[in-house]
Image: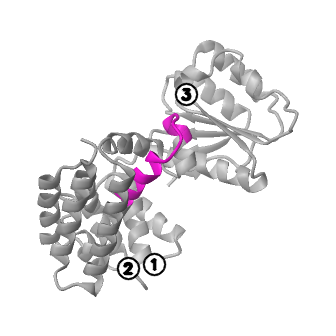
């Protein structure tokens, strides 16, 4: 999990430096600052900037006094790729940051752009480590931390089983922990994880949902049958289907814009915005409504409202896949 490396605990420090290449942790570092800023001022202006958007002089414009004296959060992604002239601007700003402005620098680490890293650290920036998790032990530590953050207890065996079943993607691990915490009462043990996630690495509930919302009915049904045969809980599949269709509904009704802007508006990470944009091409508003009704019926079926949970899921998957092709 992301950890602070310097002495300050002030989330609204003038400068936050998030260092590493783990996208989930980088997104969380940004979200933490934005949430704190909006808690202090609901009208906080958030600017999410790629290197090419931060030209020489841009930082001075963004940090200049406003007639409305509003709080701002300026997020600079891939700071290691900034031009030399823009880095000079940031270094100068570090010496005299503006009150009520939180500058968040996301840096991959390493040698490229190291001068900016050194300058931010020397200026006393709050630092958050966001390293890639490359070792099983690191992923295990991450899972334990996720359960603790949700106030839930999980046995060591359960944590290990979850890592073994889900794999190395931290987003999927975080989602799995959240799902278990929401669905299971009491201590989460290895048996619970087994019921939900056995075989998940080969055919996950999200794989079923992705194929369905893309209109690939045959592949979705194949993934569904494999998931069920390997012990994935039906309620997990209906949850994934609902998430997939709702994401399409949210994005189709949102204003156009960059992934970073839409991510803030819809509460999705930028990488998911890009994926959902690709999946939503054949969808219509009526198709979304039909799919959501099918998911609600399937959810009732797998929770005791029907005699055949497998049939209920297959029916929902076929309906969703057809709805995904309604515009083609």
Residue 193 visible at all: no
Q: What stretch is highlighted in magenta?
A: 243-261
State the residue position of label 1. Answer: 153
Indicate whether residue 176 is drawn in magenta.
no
Q: Is residue 295 above or below residue 75?
A: below
State the residue position of label 2. Answer: 188
Relative image position of residue 273 (x, y in whole percent): 43, 43
Relative image position of residue 238 (x, y in whole percent): 30, 68
Between label 1 and label 3, give the one nearer the viewer.
Answer: 3
Relative image position of residue 297 (x, y in whole percent): 30, 74
Residue 308 visible at all: yes
- In front here: 110 or 149? 149
Picture residue at 86% right of the left edge, 38% below the top: 68
Sequence order check, earlier mark of 2 and 3:
3
Indicate whether residue 251 is drawn in magenta.
yes
For this view, does 71 lie left or right of residue 245? right
Q: Is residue 148 above or below residue 102?
A: below
Sequence order check, earlier mark of 1 and 3:
3
- In front here: 241 or 144? 241
State the residue position of label 3. Answer: 50
Picture residue at 23% right of the left edge, 66% below the top: 316
Between label 2 and label 3, give the one nearer the viewer.
Answer: 3
**For the residues marked 1 and 3, what is the alpha-carbon distance in whole angstroms?**
39 Å
Dominant secondary structure, magenta: helix
Relative image position of residue 295 (x, y in whole percent): 31, 68
Residue 125, by quadrant, is: top right
Check whether the beta carbons of the residues at disc 2 and disc 1 lie within 8 A of each other: yes
**For the residues marked 2 and 1, what is the alpha-carbon distance in whole angstroms?**
6 Å
């Amino acid at each position: 999990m992301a950890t602070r490396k310097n002495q300050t605990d002030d989330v609204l420090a003038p400068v936050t430096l998030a260092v590493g290449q783990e996208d989930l942790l980088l997104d969380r570092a940004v979200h933490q600052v934005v949430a704190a800023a909006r808690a202090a001022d609901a009208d906080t202006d958030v600017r999410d900037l790629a290197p090419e958007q931060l030209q020489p002089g841009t930082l001075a414009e963004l940090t200049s006094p406003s007639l409305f004296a509003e709080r701002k959060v300026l997020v600079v992604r891939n700071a290691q790729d900034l031009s030399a002239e823009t880095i000079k601007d940031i270094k100068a700003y570090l010496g005299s940051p503006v009150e009520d402005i939180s500058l968040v620098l996301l840096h991959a680490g390493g040698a490229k752009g190291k001068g900016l890293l050194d300058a931010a650290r020397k200026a006393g920036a709050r630092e958050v480590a966001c390293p890639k998790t490359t070792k099983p032990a690191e992923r295990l530590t991450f899972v334990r931390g996720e359960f603790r953050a949700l106030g839930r207890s999980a046995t060591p065996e359960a944590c290990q089983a979850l890592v073994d079943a889900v794999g190395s993607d931290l987003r999927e691990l975080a989602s799995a922990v959240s799902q278990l915490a929401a669905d299971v009462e009491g201590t989460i043990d290895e048996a619970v994880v087994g019921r939900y996630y056995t075989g998940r690495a080969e055919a996950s509930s999200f794989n079923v949902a992705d194929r369905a919302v893309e209109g690939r009915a045959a592949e979705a049904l194949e993934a569904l049958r494999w998931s069920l045969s390997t012990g994935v809980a039906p309620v997990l599949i209906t949850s994934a289907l609902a998430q997939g269709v709702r994401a399409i509904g949210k994005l189709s009704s949102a204003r156009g814009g960059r992934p970073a802007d839409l991510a803030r508006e819809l509460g999705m990470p930028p990488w998911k915005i890009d994926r959902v944009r690709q999946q939503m091409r054949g969808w219509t508003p009526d198709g979304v409504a039909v799919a959501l009704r099918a998911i609600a019926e399937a959810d009732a079926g797998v929770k005791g409202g029907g005699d055949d949970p497998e049939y209920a899921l297959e029916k929902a998957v076929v309906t969703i896949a057809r709805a995904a092709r309604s515009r083609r």
